[in-house]
Amino acid sequence: MSTVYIYAVLLNFDLYLFVINDKLNNKLLKGNGFIMTKFNCKYILFDLDGTITESDPGITRSIKYALEKNSMVSPSLEELKIFVGPPLGEKFMEVFGVSQEMADKLLVSYRERYNPIGKYECNIYDGIVDALKQLREMGKVLCVATSKPEAAAKDVLAHFGLTEYFDLIGGDTAEHTRPNKTAVINYVMESMNISDKDDIIMVGDTHYDVEGANKIGIKCIGVTYGYDTEESLKNSGAAAIIHKPIELVDLF
């Protein structure tokens, strides 16, 4: 049997009830009925593209380069934003109906431009640095779990001076042995010796992040400032939704 404690708290002139359950996530209930879930997780895994970095310029330009090099007609850069987030090989096959062999060829061409140029054609979202700093100060252990090649992810984070905030940066391998978000999350958990799935949570901007985490029994916080919609994140089973990076701090 779980024990429940209820406290009344006044924050910014709004009355909240703080419900603490020793077996479930805490919830902060505002007087108007709004419910804010509070998570007790020690480990927080971050997606990269669309969660930490606004990375579509480099990705879409590099996809356009790959398509044109292989004599394929490229959609507009705006239309190519659907490629930000998911594993590119799978997305090439889904969108263009190409074979695995052709998808691999497109990926090689993509990396010809992306690795030296495209990976740096991005910006970090406003408020993400403050959020990372505050979460670290709260004692949270932060990691990255991205479908991007791990080497590229490390280069991008180093470029923006963000490496210091993360205990581990996990991504796909050069041999593509971690082909989806679930595989990357499993790799991060194994590398960090994390066995308690209630002590870890994912943060990402697409349904691929939510579904990849949920597939192995991990919750995911969806962010709407990236490359998916709030409706998609909710329908995929996001445990909470935030609209700005700094809002993440309020969930812990």
Image: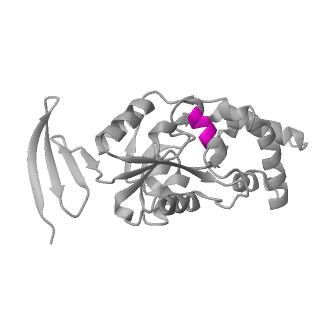
Q: Position of residue 141 (x, y in %)?
A: 39, 48
Q: Quadrant of residue 129?
A: top left
Viewer-proximal residue, 119 or 190? 190
Q: Position of residue 234 (x, y in %)?
A: 43, 51
Against 231, residue 133 (above or below) is above
Name the residue at the bottom extreme.
1
Please tell me whether residue 71 belongs to the stretch shown in magenta.
Answer: no
Number of disc labels: 0
Taking the spot 65% from the left edge, 39% from the top edge, the residue there is 81
Q: Which residues are magenta?
A: 154-158
Is 100 displayed left or right of 161 in the figure? right
Q: Position of residue 184 (x, y in %)?
A: 57, 57
Against 105, residue 56 (above or below) is above
Name the residue at the right extreme.
71
Taking the spot 13% from the left edge, 29% from the top edge, the residue there is 13
Quadrant occupied by the C terminus: top left
Report the coloring of the rendering: one colour
Against 149, residue 244 (above or below) is above
From the image, give the main secondary structure of the stretch colored magenta.
helix
Q: Position of residue 128 (x, y in %)?
A: 44, 33
On the question of residue 75 being in view, the answer is no
Q: Quadrant of residue 50?
A: top right
